[in-house]
């Protein structure tokens, strides 16, 4: 048996050489290709198939949101792009992927130290896969969003190139850092603010400031005032169908007690997946009410609840979000099966990729009242969270955001421990950037075609969208 002294010392130079060697396996220029689809491939059917097992009453809302624009469609079509990526050229350099790294899945939230940070913030599709898959989804989202905002082809290209350049340069830096230096890298929003102040005008600064202000305003107390009303002296989550429906309005009187017991049992058991100190903290709170809440685009129709809890008294509210987790679209596209239950898969991926994960992030799997076993992950509902308002971005604001997203994704990928290999593969020439930029525009065209097909399916009555 080998001892510790027998193990070779890691060599960053060798890691870079290994990455450079992968160019012979996957030529960088080939990454510009959008995977060819098999004859008869139907993007609409992919979305329809995803609706199986979801709450049928909510599926039309998902379709309505995806119909709104090509960008909204892209947000809900992670499964389609994952399949396309699996058919195109891919590197063998694998990391923990976000799995759905479009630009709206980055945002501002509070660290456990109560500092605002900017990071990837959605991990429903997280899985292991080729590093460039996340980058390709990110640049495609900038290309599609830029077109929706009326930006010219040259403006879109500059923005997409900023994403890739930021990613490549950051990865070179991370490849030179020690593992602990990299682990403690923090995407503080003050860095974003300083870039804006140095290179962009007052209007861009105001837009960034407004986003940060929105994040600071999203606290449990503000959520309580927005989501809760007092009825007969008892706090209850408001009725705002179909986006927010309390359990009392979803259930028959005879089923209400059982459904509340199911949710409260889930919260109780999920606490055991937290660090011991956080588990003790969660158990001090008392569940009071719960409601089903519609969130996002791709997640619409999955089972998602918010749970209102009280701590010390009625002036100490706390919200947890309980969200159903399924099989990652990345694993589906690759034909892989995760070693972990879906909820645990999400939590493990998030903890690895984020610098400052929610201290209340955990999971649990249990049979539902219908006898079907489902997996969930749990987190705080509001913790000073805010996402970009993409529709309001001009070319300057989007460029700032592009730089921030590229750097942040590189840091998240580097935490998988192979920054040296990625750096070696990307290199210092424009070859890698040129290929990814070309892919972004090519996929913009494909996404537009898929969105048009989705619109046609709605017009023909093949799918039914909410009015």
Image: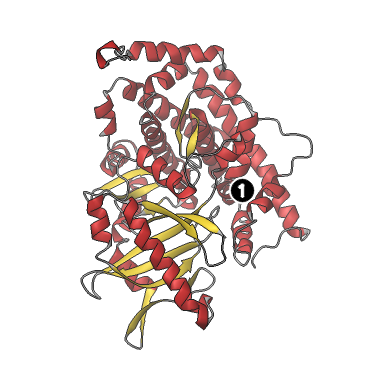
Classify residue 435 by image quadrant: top right
Q: Nearer the viewer, residue 227 or 149?
A: 227
Q: Is residue 199 left or right of residue 68?
A: left
At x 34% / y 59%, what residue is drawn? Answer: 382
Query: Where does the image place residue 413, in percent across and percent down from the top left?
Result: 40, 31
Residue 440's x, y, as percent? 57, 33
Task: Name the residue: 42% across, 19% down.
Answer: 421
Decide: is 442 above or below 457: above
The outermost residue toward the bottom is 232
Residue at x-position 68% and y-position 53%: 48
- Above or below residue 457? Residue 105 is above
Q: How far across and down, in percent of the image, does residue 208 sit?
A: 34, 48
Q: Position of residue 264 (x, y in %)?
A: 39, 67
Question: Which residue is identified by label 1?
Answer: 70
Q: Is residue 324 left or right of residue 147?
A: left
Above or below, 56 against 326 in this view is below
In the image shown, does 316 or 64 lie closer to the viewer?
316
Would residue 440 be visible to someone looking at this image?
yes
Q: Is residue 380 visible?
A: no
Which quadrant of the figure contains the C terminus? Answer: bottom right
Question: For residue 189, what is the image quadrant?
Answer: top left
Does dot 1 land on a helix, a strand or a loop? helix
Residue 147 placement, left or right of 266? right
Question: 10 Å neighbourhood of mark 1: few (<14), some, or many (≥20)?
Answer: many
């Amino acid at each position: 048996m080998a001892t510790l002294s027998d193990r070779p010392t890691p060599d960053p130079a060798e890691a870079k050489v290994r990455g450079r060697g992968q160019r012979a396996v996957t030529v960088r220029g080939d990454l510009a290709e959008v995977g060819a689809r098999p004859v008869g491939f139907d993007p609409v059917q992919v979305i329809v198939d995803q609706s199986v097992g979801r709450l049928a009453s909510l599926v039309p809302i998902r379709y309505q949101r995806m119909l709104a624009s090509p960008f909204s469609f892209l947000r809900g079509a992670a499964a389609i792009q994952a399949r396309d990526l699996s058919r195109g050229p891919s590197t063998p350099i694998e990391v923990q992927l976000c799995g759905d790294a479009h630009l709206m899945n980055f945002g501002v939230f509070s660290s456990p130290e109560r500092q605002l940070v900017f990071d990837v913030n959605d991990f429903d599709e997280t899985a292991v896969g080729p590093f460039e898959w996340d980058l390709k989804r990110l640049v495609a989202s900038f290309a599609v969003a830029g077109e929706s905002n009326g930006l010219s082809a040259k403006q879109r290209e500059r923005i997409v190139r900023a994403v890739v350049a930021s990613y490549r340069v950051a990865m070179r830096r991370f490849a030179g850092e020690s593992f602990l230096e990299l682990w403690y890298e923090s995407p503080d929003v003050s860095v974003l603010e300083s870039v804006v102040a140095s290179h962009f005008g007052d209007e861009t600064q105001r837009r960034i400031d407004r986003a940060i202000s929105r994040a600071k305003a999203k606290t449990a107390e503000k959520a309580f005032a927005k989501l809760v009303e007092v009825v007969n002296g008892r706090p209850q989550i408001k009725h705002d169908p179909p986006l927010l429906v309390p359990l009392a309005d979803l259930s028959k009187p005879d089923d209400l007690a059982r459904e509340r017991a199911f949710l409260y049992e889930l919260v109780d058991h999920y606490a055991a997946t937290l660090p011991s100190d956080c588990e003790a903290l969660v158990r001090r709170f008392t569940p009071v009410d719960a409601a089903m809440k519609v969130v996002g685009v791709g997640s619409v129709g999955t089972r998602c609840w918010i749970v209102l809890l009280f701590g010390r008294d009625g002036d100490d509210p706390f919200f947890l979000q309980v969200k159903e987790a399924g099989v990652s679209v990345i694993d589906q596209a690759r034909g892989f099966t995760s070693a972990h239950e879906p909820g645990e898969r999400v939590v493990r991926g998030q903890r690895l990729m984020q610098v400052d994960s929610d201290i209340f992030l955990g999971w649990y799997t249990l049979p539902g009242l219908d006898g079907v076993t489902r997996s969930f992950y749990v987190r705080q509902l509001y913790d000073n969270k805010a996402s970009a308002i993409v529709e309001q971005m001009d070319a300057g604001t989007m460029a700032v955001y592009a730089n921030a997203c590229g750097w942040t994704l590189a840091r998240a990928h580097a935490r998988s421990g192979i920054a040296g290999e990625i750096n070696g593969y990307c290199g210092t020439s424009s070859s890698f950037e040129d290929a990814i930029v070309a892919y972004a525009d090519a996929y913009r065209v494909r996404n537009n075609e898929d969105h048009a097909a989705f619109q046609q399916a709605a017009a023909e009555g093949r799918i039914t969208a909410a009015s």
